[in-house]
Image (cartoon, rainbow, N blue to C red):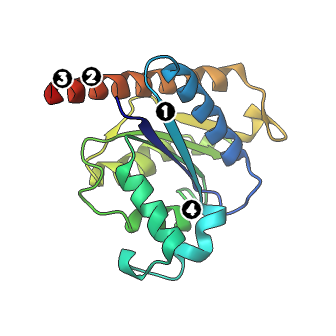
Amino acid sequence: MSKIRIAVVIGNPSAKSRTKVLAQAISARLADGLAGQLPVQIQTLEIANLAPALLTGGWPAELPADGAAAVRAIEAADLIVAVTPVYKGSYTGLFKHLFDLVSPDALVGRPVLLAANGGSDRHALVVDHQLRPLFSFFRALTVPSSVYAAESDFDGYTIRSPALQARIGEAAEQAVALIIQKAHAKHLLAA
């Protein structure tokens, strides 16, 4: 079987962030869950690094090489992990701009694990009220369990909350099940 491609999109415009820590924890759980079952290739796409490449074009054809490669990585991924900080009650503008550049039909039926982090638990519904509708537009298959992390779940830039670790594990387990199911169905159809 070919490698399972996972695109991890980190929507924080800062290079050092709790969003990145959350995304890395999710990626590690996914890699552990797929270990020994399917080969995995994880590509991390950080808005903090991509911002210059994304701001030069309003259309995919206008993007420089880095921006175009990021859009292609999302469109080609077998699983997308979308992680964003909460900014004014929603995802960040650059996160949305990146997905505005993705073809409307590119993610149909594609599993997407949703995660966000914010200053307090008051923002927890951002995942269901902002992220889930965004990926519904793409007709993507969002993982039933999502991950939300409040500032109190961290000790600086380290996850300290067992409850958050459990939520990460639950969402990763569901994503792995979807990936394995799709990989086996694809293999059976090819046989």
Which residue is under mark 4? 92
Which residue is under mark 3? 188
Which x, y percent locates residue 191?
15, 24
**Which quadrant would residue 103 be assigned to in this image?**
bottom left
- Image side of residue 79 versus residue 117, left or right: left
Would you call the spot at circle 2 few (<14 residues within 10 Å), some (14-19), or many (20 or more)? Answer: few
Which x, y percent locates residue 61?
36, 79
Q: Earlier in the sequence, mark 2 or mark 1?
A: 1
Q: Is label 4 or label 2 in front?
A: 2
What is the tally of numbered marks visible in this picture?
4
Nearest to the observer: residue 122 or residue 67: 67
Which residue is under mark 1? 40
Per the image, label 2 sits on a secondary structure element best described as: helix
Q: Amino acid at mark 1?
A: Val
At a point 41% along the width and 82% down the height, the residue shown is 62
**Which quadrant would residue 109 be assigned to in this image?**
top left
Per the image, label 1 sits on a secondary structure element best described as: strand
Q: CA distance from mark 4 to mark 1?
A: 28 Å
Q: CA distance from mark 4 to mark 2?
A: 35 Å
Which x, y percent locates residue 167?
57, 24
Give the vertical position of 32 relative to 81 (above or below): above
Q: Amino acid at mark 2?
A: His
Q: Earlier in the sequence, mark 3 or mark 4?
A: 4
Per the image, label 3 sits on a secondary structure element best described as: helix
Which residue is under mark 2? 184
Which x, y percent locates residue 92?
56, 62
The answer to whether marks 2 and 3 mark residues whose Cβ atoms lie closer than 8 Å is: yes
